[in-house]
Image (cartoon, grey):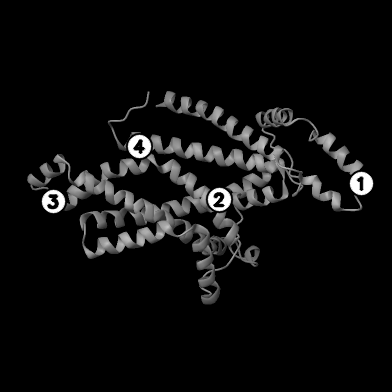
Amino acid sequence: MLRYVLRRLLQMVPVLLWMTMITFMVMQLAPGDYFTNLQLNPQISRETLDRIRHTLGLDQPWYIQYVQWLWSIVRLDFGFSFAWQVPVAWLLGSRMVNTLLLSLTSMTAAWMLAIPLGIYAATRQYRPGDHLLTVLALIGISVPGFFAALLLLYVAFYTGWLPIGGMTSPNFDLLSPLGRVLDVTHHLVLPTIVLGVLSVAGLMRQLRGNMLDVLRQDYVRMARAKGLAERAVIYKHALRNALNPLVTIFGYELGGLLSGAALVEGVIGWPGLGQLTLEAVLKKDLYLIMGSVLMGGFMLQMGNLAGDIMLAYLDPRIRYE
């Protein structure tokens, strides 16, 4: 297993290299840069901006800039944000924690709901409950994330049940440690509902189909023929094998949540990595964009690796060499 993990970690390197290189090239092909907007400021001369570009190496070909940026990444130097005037690593660290908090909370809530709902639908196939869950799942799959976020914002605004925007309240610094945890949790409810509900729909449908396939297998019929209780057949035999295909998509689910979180963060105002990346693109903050893309790709790759490792532990037939 250790050899497999090390090999997968090494395989991440070319993937991240290609991803960052293409992103860097596309950003360089786009017209203008961060300092282009500063040319509208009459207090800053064009000569001053050209001197700044030369000092930062932004007047060199894109491939030379990319190699220089790559060498700085090897030295754990993510560069300096032009717009925020702080190190990129500091920005990424603070925002990545917020995005991981939102994504993992949404994923945990989605799986905790999807598993019992999928089992319920599979064990009551074609009954009213199954039909109702199928309709709700299709609606959840069809509704875009940003529309669901706007709809919930509208409900939260008129009901006042949930806070709108941000991660904390204005009096956050005056609260006790427990009060701060509860305040962040209160702000986390709205984006978690948006991301979690959309994930529940797909996971529930996937688990329902897997359960129906497993329940038709010969070993399940044999377990029932031996007089094993139906609850034991469902949870001890069928569920474990039905969950294996879901574990394989864990990494893709995490990647989908990260990309979905980028839209939700922009709509709801959650201070995460997605919102930061969007602001960086709009401001053409090159080094911050590259750092965000690198961190997003790395988290996606780690999610895929975590899914494969969990599958190996859940299914003894799978062995990685």
The Cα atoms of the two marked residues, 2 and 4, are separated by 25 Å
Q: Which mark is residue 311?
A: 4
The amino acid marked with disc number 1 is Ser
Q: Position of residue 275 (x, y in %)?
A: 62, 53
Q: Which mark is residue 99?
A: 2
**Residue at x 14%, y 40% (from the top left corner):** 218
Question: Dot 4 lies on which element?
Answer: helix
The Cα atoms of the two marked residues, 3 and 2, are separated by 43 Å
Q: Between label 3 and label 2, give the one nearer the viewer.
A: 2
The residue to which callout 3 is attached is 229
Horizontal arrangement in the rendering, residue 169 relative to residue 223 (left or right): right
The Cα atoms of the two marked residues, 4 and 3, are separated by 27 Å
Q: Quadrant of the N terminus?
A: top left
Dot 1 or dot 2, earlier in sequence: 1
Q: Position of residue 195 (x, y in %)?
A: 47, 56
Q: Position of residue 300 (x, y in %)?
A: 50, 40
Question: Dot 2 lies on which element?
Answer: helix
The residue to which callout 1 is attached is 45
Vertical relation: 103 (above or below) 54: below
Q: Would residue 164 be seen by someone viewing this image from the given angle? A: yes
The amino acid marked with disc number 2 is Thr
Q: Are marks 1 and 4 in contact (CB under 8 Å)?
A: no
**Residue at x 80%, y 46% (from the top left corner):** 36
The Cα atoms of the two marked residues, 1 and 2, are separated by 39 Å
Horizontal arrangement in the rendering, residue 4 relative to residue 204 (left or right): right
Dot 3 or dot 2, earlier in sequence: 2
Q: Between label 1 and label 2, give the one nearer the viewer.
A: 1
Dot 4 or dot 3, earlier in sequence: 3
